[in-house]
Structure formats: C-alpha cells, structure tokens
Amino acid sequence: METSQKHPIMVFGPHRSGTNFVQKILELNYPVEQIGTGRADGDRTWKHHSYSNRLADILDKEYSFAIVCARDPIKWLNGIVKFNANLWKTCPVISKDNSIYNWEYKNLVEYIKDHPEWEDFKMDIRLCIKHWNDWYFSWFYQTRFTNYTFIHYHDMLIPEKRDKVLGMLEIKYGLERTSDTLSIPGEVEHSRAWNDMKTKEELDISLTSNLKHEWLEYAFENFDPEIVEKIEASRMI
C-alpha cells in the first residue's frame, strides 16, 4: 500500500528506554518525517528531554503527535549501569573518589582534561532513579500538550502485543503502513543485534546482572510507585 501522507512526529524517553527501537519501527513501516534525536536542531527537541512548556510550544507548532517510551524501571536501571550512553548530560554520575561532575565545564571531555580519574567512574544509583522519577513526572503531570501516547518497550517485543499497539496508533493518528509486511529492525544504535534470546532476557525482570543487591533494594524502595502505576495503567493493551 502507498500513501503520500507524511507525519512529522517525535519519540521521547529517558536514555535506554527503547526510543531507538520504537523510532526505527515507525520509520520502517509508516510515511513519517521522523526527527527522533533532535541533534539536527541544536537539541531543542532532543528525544531525551523531559517535558517543558518550551518543548510543548515546539511540538504544537511543528509535529503531528509524540510518542513517549517507557521501560520496566528495574530493567531500565540495569541497562543504564551496563551502558549509560550520554546520561551525564541530564543526570550526574560520580567518579571513584565520589567527586560530582562540575557543571561549570562545557562538557565531559573538558572535565576529563583536569580530572583524569573520571575515566574510572561509577553511576550514582540514587541520582539515576531520581532522574527517572523526575522525567516521567514531568510528562504525566502536565496538561499543556496532550497529543502524545505512551508506549511500553516490552509490548513492542512481543509480536501479538506489538501488532495491537501499532493497530491502535494507526487508528488514533490515521497512520497507514507503507507495506503489508511489518519490518522489524534487527539492530539499532546503542544495542546489539536483536534476537529471540535478547527478547527473553529483556522480558525476564529477574535478570539484573549489572545491579548489586543493595542497589536493587534501594531501587525497589525509591522508584516512585505512583509513577510506576501510571505507566502500567497507560499501557495500550
């Protein structure tokens, strides 16, 4: 099937929340004008931005709708510890001597020049969890921009659930597939090639090999239960 209709949209989410995977599925299967990273416009619509009124103004004027991605918080934390991407841009980390990154420096590269010990750093679990709570709070408790839909990353990994989610998006936003066959990305940025074993590992919430026991205890106590409940309630299926 072919259609000339174009949909400029945005996909948002914290680092390691499945944004690249969701974005790629939309790009492969629908006639979307996707600017998923925001890199081309000076980060003003960077996909990892939390909600702000400035961002809402841009979305209202320039985009058809937005997708906000969520991942199980424990699996998210496990993924962040394994690979933090550029989380330091929005969530501080600490070096081995517990010195917090000084935001007076323009970027991490400049900081490392004066603090070579930074190359051996660890994540501050407390700050990561606070960042997750704050990020989703900013989207859930705003009323200015309403033309967005939450997608749970795990629902996109199970074929029958993925089909239902995409079907609902098609109805809600008038999307038409560019082909009768759904294309699934085999590999996306910051993730190794996808396979059935990786799906199984992701869906098994008990697999958290990157998290220490005390980190898990802290996580279960400090991920905002109201936010977690809202994410579960927002799942489309």
Image (spheres, rainbow, N blue to C red):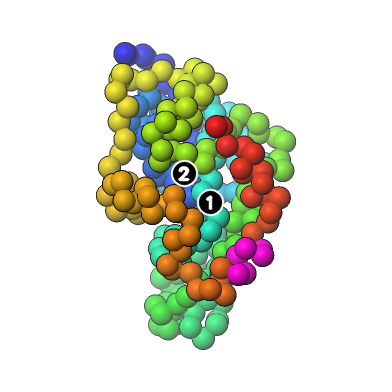
Q: Is residue 193 left or right of residue 114?
A: left
Secondary structure, mark 1, is loop
Q: Could you tell me what secondary structure mostly forms the magenta stretch?
A: helix
- The amino acid beneath tag 1 is Asp
Marks 1 & 2, CB-CB < 8 Å contact: yes
- Earlier in the chain: of badge 1 and badge 2, it is 1
The residue nearer to you, when weighing 125 against 43, is: 125
Callout 2: SS: helix
Circle 1 crowding by C-alpha within 10 Å: few under 14, some 14–19, many from 20: some
In which quadrant will I find the C terminus? top right
Q: Position of residue 86 (x, y in %)?
A: 44, 60
Could you give the CA–CA distance between mark 1 and mark 2, rounded to whole angstroms?
A: 8 Å
The magenta stretch spans residue 100: no
Looking at the rendered structure, the kind of residue marked 2 is: His
Residue at 42%, 67% (x, y): give it.
209
Instruction: From this view, report whether residue 85 is shown above or below residue 64.
Output: below
Residue 84: quadrant of the picture: bottom left
In magenta, the rendered stretch is 217-222
Disc 2: which residue: 154
Q: Residue at x 30, y 39 (%)?
A: 185
Q: Position of residue 180 (x, y in %)?
A: 31, 18
Q: Position of residue 16 (x, y in %)?
A: 45, 54
At a point 70% along the width and 35% down the height, the residue shown is: 144
Of residues 167 and 174, the one drawn nearer to the viewer in this rendering: 167
Q: Position of residue 179 (x, y in %)?
A: 30, 20
Q: Which label was assigned to residue 72?
A: 1
**Compared to 224, does 233 lie above or below?**
above
Residue 88 can be seen in this image:
yes
Residue 234, placed above or below residue 225: above
Q: State the mark number for residue 183.
A: none
